[in-house]
Image (spheres, coloured by chain):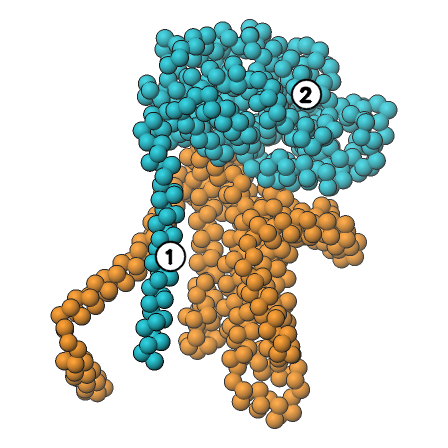
Chain colours: A orange, B cyan
Amino acid sequence: MSVVETGKQEKLLQRKEALERRVTGKETMVQSDRIFGWGLKAGGLLIMALFLVVLLVCIVTAWPSIRKFGFSFLWSQAWNPSRGIFGGLTYIIGTFWVTGIALVISIPVAIFSALFLSDYAPKWMSGIVSTLMEMLAGIPSIVFGAFGITFMVPILRDHLEPFLANTLGTRWDFFNGDALGYGVLAAGIVVGFMIVPLVATVTRDSLLMVPQEMVEASYALGATKAETLFFVKLKAVIPGIVGSVILGFGRAVGETMAVLLLIGNQASIPETIQDVGYTISSLLANTFTYAVIDPLYAAAEVELGLILLMMTLVVNTLGRKLLMRLMGGRLAGSVGGG
Amino acid sequence: MFLSNSSRSSRNKRVKTRFGRIILFLFAACLAPFLAAGPGWAAGSITISGSSMLFPLEQVWAVAYMKSHPGVHISVASTGSGFGISNAANGNITIGASDAYLTKDLRKRYPNLVSVPIAFDDAQVIYNVPGLPKSVTLRFDGKVLARIFLGKIRFWNDRQIRALNPGVHFPHTRIRVVHRADASGTTFVFTDYLAQTSSEWFNQVGRDMSPAWPVGSGYNGSDAVVAAVMSSPGSIGYVGLGWVKEYKLTTAALKNLDGYFVEGSVDTIRKAGHAALKDPSFPDDFNRSMVWNIHGKDVYPDANFEFWMINTNLDGETMKHVRDLIMWALSEGQNAKYTVDSGFAPLPFRPLKGRLDKIIHRLLPGNSYNVRSPG
């Protein structure tokens, strides 16, 4: 092994020397190369430094709260700024509610639309729909929030939420809440709309990359189009879907403006799907400028921000691991990077 | 091949130079005001930041003041009362605007701050009861209101609400509590009224600009509160005077100390201020924004002062400008075209004088409110 490697290295060295000989003004080239290299290194280091500084500032600011409440911050519901008591459970659970509803709504829609675009839509149509989808992904979240208030809230309040309460709600309390329009359902649905384009485009791109031979082999075995789609193509792109869902999670979990406008901003843990709630990001957006008045209050809010950061980090890492296993360690880096 | 390449590159070059010129021009245009304003601007520069409620009033004040006082530059920002207080204390801004007074805790944390009352505002209760004619004004007292906002009274036809409103027919509709989600001075004033009139509220929630609301749903800003109350049947919420006027809302009459039910208006708020300042027990340093416990017939029980927080450690030159601005704001600035048009009530002027003397004196020894020094 080592003999082969030294041989390789020698070859490389020779090639390099030949290249250098061919180039005139050797000195300046090396110099400029070095400067260029420094520039690149500075860029790379800056990103690392930025991440570390943000993390460090957050930890230092959050320290009074971390020291005072310890791990109980994670499972305490008490949040009373005027008495200096802080626990983040309500906001953590609220964040999961919205993210959960958003994913439940967006994943099927996104996969169906991706399948439609890759295999069923006529060419002219898939072009139009793809462009529209990319435009949809670029709409600012505040616009989605405004759409939610003017369009979704009245529909939920007058139709969907009473309907859920009168049908599923008679059997399960989970669906039997007060039809206010605002709440975790409204926020979840709109955030779901926001991540559909994200999940759908990545899924469509992976579907288009499935080797034609696999599809032909499936047809040759007598499978129908739908069977081929579901059991061959979709199965082959599971890693891509997982990766896109992770991206979607990252977007949903930190989404602020649209959620703030729709969730009803009430610090209570939702018991039914119609209930109001509160997420970490909307709490910070609503109250952080006021929280700076009291170091402990600000610390508690920054600690919630840290928890949000950890949530995305953990999900991203787990997602990468999962992808790695599913893909046999090949494509993971290119898809899982949130 | 070669020709076309060179022509393209020259075109690119031309575009680049034009682009460069545009950039240079924009840059110069951005810089010009700074250069032109020069040293004069730096000398009389005042930054006001804080309360979003006071922001509209401060904007019209700044425009009018800069017109009549050339050489003084005022920049105003709406950043929230908490930001205003903490940044006035650490010297980042000249004046911190706040809807709330300095509580005991805050005075301990920021001993250098002096609060100067500059306008009058209130919190008023708005509601949307299905089937209730617009002409009917509901009546509440602090106890019933507190029980509604605690989630203990859950339907509009509750016995306790009917007892306060004889002759009004209420539907059996769920009450939907609407409150502010962002930290707000209106919330402080409203919860202060509840805390002062209901021991239940005092013990369970207390007063705060961002309290732990037991029930309801929260919205960012008073406009969103108005929209939520108007769009969801059964709602009850609260907003300040400015929004009541702007949206022509029907508001509830609140029970005052002497048992009268009074609706909030410029007139009833000012009466409350007059009565409060005549009361010998009212603190000299104004560290009580609420004027709820005031005797009188037409006294609205949920009015409050709006404050500017001044750091006593400002340098002499800046303090002189600040003092001039405060004096202007308290005299000419109280004109209805500024205050009432921005949704505030002017300060009840004469009774304030004695106390303002003391505050101005503390801010800048040797000066008091009635000294209109030209500079």
Question: Would you say the residues marked 2 and 1 are in contact, meaning their CB atoms lie under 8 Å apart?
Answer: no
Q: Is residue B281 above or below residue B111?
A: above
The picture places residue A68, in percent across and down from the top left corner, at 42, 38
The answer to whether any part of residue A231 appears in the image is: yes
**Residue that appears at 18% across and 70% down:** A29
Specify whether disc 2 shares its chain with disc 1: yes
Tell me which numbered mark, 2 or 1, is placed earlier along the sequence: 1
What's under tag 1, amino acid-wise? Phe
Dot 2 falls on which chain? B
Q: CA distance from mark 2 to mark 1?
A: 57 Å
| Secondary structure beneath label 1 | helix
* B239, above or below A228, in the image: above
Give the residue number, with chain letter if any, for mark 1: B19
Viewer-proximal residue, A137 or B122?
A137
Picture coordinates of residue A337, whole percent (x, y):
43, 65
Q: Is residue B198 above or below residue A272?
A: above
Residue B127 drawn above or below residue A197: above
Neighbour tally class for label 1: few under 14, some 14-19, many 20 plus, Cα within 10 Å? few
Name the residue at 39% across, 47% down. B26
B332 vs B214, left or right, is: left
Image quarter in which the C terminus of chain B is found: top left
Query: Can residue B310 be seen in this snapshot?
Result: no
Numbered label attached to residue B265:
2
Which image quarter: residue B302? top right
| Amino acid identity at mark 2 | Ser
Q: Position of residue B236 (x, y in %)?
A: 71, 34
Q: Nearer the viewer, residue B352 or B46?
A: B46
